[in-house]
Amino acid sequence: MDVPWWKTAVTYQIYPRSFCDTGCGRDQSAEGVGDLEGVIRHLDHLLWLGVDVIWLSPFFPSPMNDFGYDVSDYCGVDPLFGDLGTFDRLVAESHRRGIRVVIDWVPNHTSIDHPWFAASRSSRQDPKRDWYVWRDPAPGGGPPNNWIESLTMGPAWTLDAATGQYYLHCFLPTQPDLNWSNAEVVAAMHDTLRFWLERGVDGFRMDVVHLIGKDPDLPDDPEVVAGLPHVVLNDRPETHAHLRSIRRLLDESGERVSIGEVYLLDPAQVVEYYGRDDELHLCFNFAPLHARWNATAWRHQIEQSEAALGPVAAWPTWVLSNHDNPRHRTRYGGSEARARAAAVLLLTLRGAPFLYAGEELGLLDAEIGDDQHRDPGGRDGCRAPIPWDGTPTHGWTDATPWLPWPPEAERRNVANLREDPTSILHLYRDAIALRRATPSLQLGDLSLVDSPDGVVAYRRTLGLDSVVIAVNFTDSTVDLLGYPNLFDGRLMLSSIHPTAERALTHLDADEAAIIAPFEVAP
Ligand code: TEU
């Protein structure tokens, strides 16, 4: 069976600012900001962990108003992070280790500092005026429509006094939206994809890609949802046409992947962006990231994902943490046991799992002091630097890092947790290895199986290979007698007991288990 590589891949998201500062980037503010050399330095660790793909959040030249999601040159590396030579080495060193490299692509908006916008803004007659979305003020003055931007929840329009028109920005005023209905914009953005494909990247994570096609009339968002940012509402046929041509472009370059950040919260809407296997290869599914830690909520998430994606054979994705939201251990109340159970869930559901750097250490969000806020969207806590060891600088240079360290960094760091085979870091490594060795975990069907209250259990099946996963979402022991699917098997992995060879009569509080049925046990 010829399975595309991205179906079985475990992807690891790196937020370069926060990964590791080696001092190789040019940091004018004299604070510690991670760089691409820091990624290269730790590739062996990622190989040890067992991930297949790294996804790098933006490292392009940028004024950093949105920490790189405001790009001023799509085809370069910000000196803060290194240069194109460093990037090429990163790709080569990753590929040498069998690790693929996916980069972020930010097609909906540029930075206000991009030369395209400087030209567009310069006059109404400029040839690039139409590269962005300009409109006259509403009759009587004020923004052309009621759209809300996503980061500060203000109006999505800013008046350019010099030319008397408003420009659209679904994010900060420093992130003007490109006009994808202009063919020159499409061609220029396609060129940026080709630039990185030629440098050997294996694919793109496409930032708010569902937002690139817009209703040409730019009508008001409906009153009932007024107050929601336009990004979660924009769902247009124009986008699908753009995605089909992007897909053709990628397909011409061999086996590359597109992973869309389709920030619509209903999986039934999101599935449309896979097209007929002719649009995105994968789309993030963010509903689970907002789900509470309980069995009912998670059973619902699994059912919803299966119901939306199963019938059209679209491959699901699972993500618990990223650079935009509080880390899941923080969201789930701080319990490491829950974070461990969540890791087993993430790595055993049907679909492609995405890890966010630091979750394998069980990191909590950093406490951000009043004078330490950096992000206008308030997302600093999950972007705290990664502690690599227990020294005072935690494996970074001695410049003070751009954000405070996460809690317990002197103990909860890579070097220390690698020494401890019972650590959450080893649990991630073991679960990833088991996944790789178990065809049903990688590619098998999923069906929910009968389980006690507070437990979600499911079977993964591929041909004769079959395993059952049971996750106890409660903080008490749950008896499994009476549930033959669950206790009648061999425990392959427990989220709590590292080498537990035990009869599976019960699950401990917050325990997740991977169970092989006896008949296929060696
Ligand atoms: O995020 C899109 C997005 O919708 C989120 O920013 C969301 O609105 C926000 O986190 C709510 O708190 C992507 C990137 O992941 C994010 O970092 C960027 O800021 C944003 O796009 C703009 O490029």
Image (tube, grey):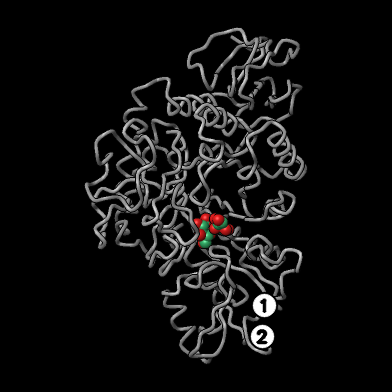
The x, y position of residue 287, in whole percent, is 66, 46
At horizontal 39% and vertical 38% (from top left) the residue drawn is 407
Q: Find ligand 1 in the image and state its quadrant.
A: bottom right
Q: Nearer the viewer, residue 448 or 258?
A: 448
Q: Position of residue 36 (x, y in %)?
A: 33, 51
Badge 2: residue crowd in 10 Å (few <14, some 14–19, many ≥20): few
Q: Nearer the viewer, residue 343 or 129?
A: 343
Of the image marks 2 and 1, the number of the one nearer the N terminus: 2
Query: Which quarter of the rendering shows the N terminus?
Result: top right
In the depicted structure, whether residue 43 falls above or below residue 211: above
What's the distance in space between the residues labelled 2 and 1, CA to CA? 7 Å
Q: Quadrant of residue 446?
A: top right
Q: Kindly state the secondary structure of the residue where label 2 is placed.
A: loop
* Residue topped by disc 2: 138
Q: Residue furthest front?
A: 370
Whether residue 125 is situated above or below residue 145 in the rendered picture: below
Secondary-structure class at tag 1? loop
* Residue 145 marker: 1
Can you say whether 393 is above or below 411 in the image?
Answer: below
Q: Which residue is located at x 60 percent, y 38 percent?
A: 3
Number of numbered discs present? Answer: 2
Q: Mark 2 and mark 1 in contact? Answer it, CB < 8 Å.
A: yes
**Residue 494 to residue 321: above or below:** above
Task: Identify the disc placed on residue 166.
Answer: none
**Which quadrant holds the C terminus?**
top right
Residue type pointed to by label 2: Ala
* Residue for point 48% across, 56% down: 378
Q: Amino acid at mark 1?
A: Asn
Q: Nearer the viewer, residue 436 or 393?
A: 393
Instruction: Name the residue located 47 percent from the left edge and 72 percent from the top edge.
Output: 174
